[in-house]
Image (spheres, coloured by chain):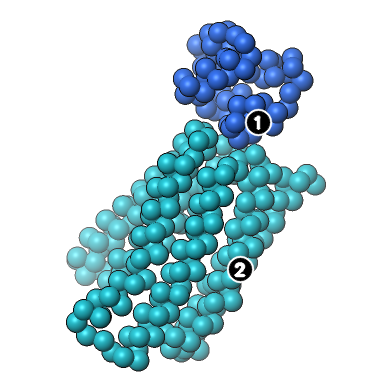
Chain colours: A cyan, B blue
Amino acid sequence: MSAEVAARRSSVFWVALFLIGMFGTGIGARVAGLSGVWTMIVMLPPMLLLIPMIRSVERSSAAQGCASPALQRYNRRALTWSFAYVAMLFLAITVNDRLHPQGPLLWAIAILPALPILYMVWSFHRYLVEETDEYLKMRNIGNALVGMGVVLAVATVWGFLESFGVVPHAPGWLVVPLWGFGLGAAQIWRMVRGA
Amino acid sequence: MRNRLKVLRAERDWSQQDLAERLEVSRQSVNAIETGKYDPSLPLAFRIADLFGMPIEEIFQRD
């Protein structure tokens, strides 16, 4: 087995473990009827799987010859915003549950989990500015456009279905995981096609 | 667009990784250019031409 195949299998393993850990724990917490704060606490261990996952993806990228310093910096920033997001969400839910704030404090608490996501948007912009490898840049812009297409398509269709009372309301923050899903799907599609 | 990158690289006994390091790009970029999946920008095409000491049109040709 070549080093490239071994690295790719390792990254698939860690990505699968992370997704199973996150979804499995999330579903388990819901079934057990845990409160918001306890859900956040039990979600932390599977969240830590992000670290070996990102490292294995980096090793796989290096073995496939598509690693770049800009991409490494982007991955480090992704770790930062991911953990910051969990911390901010934990803080916001805890303060909201215990203090039941009103007025400006409620606004501040509600906006807190959005800040790491804004940092994510900025970090993707930084990646595009810092990436000197034009082929990798073109590929990643293409992947991001697929993500954006998925967001526009799903949000538009869902929005009209919601307006006509066919489906329940969906929170606006779902656009971020939806974008990530589209981007990831485009990456996997390229990997499968060898493009 | 066709190119002679693979032949020129083989003549010098360079791997894709060797060429990628000389051009300061990823190995995937070299592979994509060689296999015709990606046409390089003019600045990168000039860098390739400079590296091989040849005019661009001797490396890249129209289909």
Mark 2 chain: A
Quadrant of residue A114 in the image?
bottom left
Residue at the (58%, 19%) spot, across then down: B48
Classify mark 1: helix, strand or loop: helix
Vertically, is B3 above or below A9? above
CA separation in Å, label 1 and label 2: 33 Å
Vertically, is A102 above or below A53? below
Residue B13 percent across, percent down from the top left: 77, 20
Q: Is residue A168 visible?
A: no
Residue at the (60%, 40%) spot, across then down: A66
Horizontal side of B59 relative to A124 (left or right) equals right
Horizontal side of A23 relative to B6 (left or right) equals left
Vertically, is A80 above or below B18? below
Mark 1 chain: B
Residue A173 percent across, percent down from the top left: 33, 66
Q: Is residue A87 visible?
A: yes
> The residue under label 1 is which amino acid type?
Glu
Mark identifier at residue A49: 2
Mark identifier at residue B21: 1
Q: Which-is-in-front pick, marks 1 and 2? A: 1
Q: Looking at the figure, which quarter contains the C terminus of chain A? A: top right
Residue at the (46%, 20%) spot, across then down: B42
